[in-house]
């Protein structure tokens, strides 16, 4: 069975309407949803990238879209066996592909405020039914990218801070310095959470990026940081 | 595959027990859940109505039920190809149908506090298996209705306020006055969120009702309003 | 179709990665998730127990695991037709079974911080495919138990407090005394929520344990109590 994953900043009330629309077009699909922080294009970009590593034959419908209903354009991206549908606002910054279609919105009878349901869900259902994505608009080769390096990409529900930094030249228990916004703090380089219980920790996270945490505590709250903030990690 | 949607004011701990019960009776079903604000019969009534437009062959089990285990009665409603099961407390105010069964609770070995699991989920499983709803109680023609006009029906996770008002005689960018509770505010009539970034906006929402919002801000929090509050929108 | 239920203290970002991993091994499965309070082994232990009464042919993957990546061991438990996979930290305190396998983590190419995805999800997928659990480690007969009697096991989203106490020798409307932490309060023994609207209530909950609540109010917040707190209920 193919999968659809709806990555959006809105709640079940809206995602269930999208699900109903999809199922009215194609029944044989497994649909899951994940909510990101309201308006957070950066965390959506990161989540889409990370989840796409674990799913094949999957359509990602991505809706963080404050400019819905205006001149902003939407796209469909094909990569390997996955498709990505959503506004071209940076949300697909981490998806590398040159198979891009710019959606022709005039082909759809859409409300002004909910393209997720009235356009993207309809396209997803039709892709499931075998329709070619070139039917939905014209080819394009570039999508909008936003710079994610040295930024906070995501904060998980424990307050662990996932950064856009891939690696650091450090060994187990090395002392590190972290600069976030105007703040500077100390941290210890570790392998897992409970390796260090007093100080902030830096470790290679399960997404392949460096993360900043604190054992059984909420690093993001203590440091008062947000997704998108600039971050630098270096050895003293 | 048929669908079940559980609309309730309780969390996964309870909906998963309902799901286990349903699956023990009939396996071939897709089950989704949506949580509404605790005790909010009005928002549940609205959500049930709005979702029922997008789902066919679906059983809605609706449990916002502070008077569970008392003399309050429960009903099964059939409408087109959908069924609705839940307490007769106004939760089905927006469902127009005359096929109503009042559930005979004595037919079930139920706990006093969780009819969602012990009665409604059992009925849903049996309907999936083809059982006639007349087996579960006696016919009735009326259900309890609560007045939803000129009220706030729902507040979404952005703080957009969905009202029970269907239309207003206004044009794009017209100035409007809104009266909520004792407060009066100005607003601009627009087509979508980003059409106006300073003032409150009123627009025809994706549910077909007028909504009150503020671009990338939380209108409901700023105005300090709740579901059920009275609202009036008019041209100056 | 078989079921997997993921009981964890982390959000969808992590459970969806687990889901992707499982589906890459075995497609024919229904997967559901439930989030517990961060680090709350007690509430996870209770939820696993309560849900296992309603699900058959189900694999519970249970991840409340602050010591992931250290010497703490993980287990697979078989009971009737269900399997339980997770850290041996007390999370399975309410599951009575002697079919236990201690997982040999060296068999897996795992990250240090996400065994839920890199070990437990892989095992679950392989169990679905018919693999014998003895392939994943060595037999064991005991699992770690934590004492749950006279403790708060769970607080639901209404603030109802589920205790580890099975019964009390009381009749409808009897006056009771409750001792939680250092506080003592009065309560009325009832059958369901709306039987008593002023005082705290005690009733036999839908899980089979005594619960403490207050009609359309949040007992846990008013009493300022947490999961794991000691509780005693007795007749005056």
Image (cartoon, coloured by chain):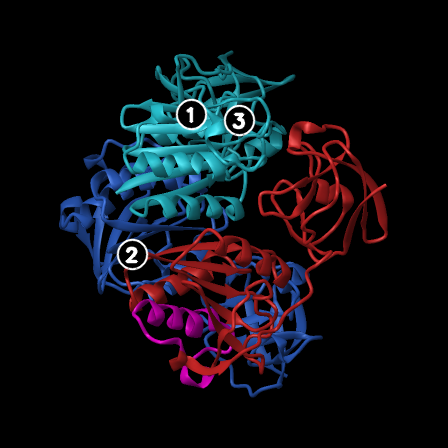
Chain colours: A cyan, B red, C blue
Residue B181, given in percent of the width and then of the height, sits at 81, 53
Could you tell whether B142 is left or right of C135 in the image? right
Q: Is disc 1 surrounded by few (<14), some (14 to 19) or many (20+) residues within 10 Å?
A: many
Magenta region includes residue B127? yes
**C-alpha separation, residue under disc 2 versus residue under disc 3:** 44 Å
Q: Against A207, is B95 above or below?
A: below
Q: Against C19, is B128 above or below?
A: below
User: Please, what secondary structure does the residue beneath circle 1 have?
Assistant: strand
Q: Identify the residue under disc 2.
A: C143
Q: Identify the residue under disc 1.
A: A203
What is the number of the mark on residue B186? none
For the C terminus of chain B, which image quadrant? top right
**C-alpha separation, residue under disc 1 versus residue under disc 2:** 30 Å
Magenta region includes residue A197? no
Q: Identify the residue under disc 3.
A: A41
Q: Against A29, is C142 above or below?
A: below
Q: Please indicate, yes or no, whether residue A206 appears anywhere in the rendered image.
A: no
**Rendered residue at 41%/17% (across/down):** A166
């Amino acid at each position: 069975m193919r999968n659809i994953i709806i990555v959006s900043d809105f709640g079940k009330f809206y995602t269930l309407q999208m699900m109903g629309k999809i199922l009215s077009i194609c029944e044989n699909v497994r649909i899951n949803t994940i909510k990101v922080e309201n308006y957070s294009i950066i965390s959506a970009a990161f989540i889409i990238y990370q989840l796409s590593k674990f799913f094949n034959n999957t359509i990602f419908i991505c809706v963080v879209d404050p400019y819905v209903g205006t001149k902003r354009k939407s796209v469909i991206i094909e990569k390997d066996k996955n498709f990505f549908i959503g506004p071209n606002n940076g949300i697909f910054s981490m998806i590398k592909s040159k198979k891009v279609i710019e959606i022709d919105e005039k082909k759809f009878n859409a409300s002004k405020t909910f393209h997720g349901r009235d356009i993207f869900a309809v396209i997803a259902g039709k892709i499931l039914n075998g329709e070619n994505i070139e039917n939905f608009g014209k080819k394009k080769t570039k999508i909008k990218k936003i710079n994610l390096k040295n930024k906070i990409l995501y904060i998980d529900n424990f307050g662990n801070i996932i950064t856009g930094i891939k690696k650091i030249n450090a060994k187990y228990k090395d002392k590190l310095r972290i600069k976030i916004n105007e703040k500077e703090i100390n941290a210890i380089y570790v392998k897992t959470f409970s390796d260090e219980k007093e100080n902030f920790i830096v470790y290679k996270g399960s997404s392949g990026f460096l993360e900043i945490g604190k054992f059984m505590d909420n690093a993001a709250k203590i440091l008062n940081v947000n997704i998108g903030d600039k971050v630098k990690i270096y050895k003293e």
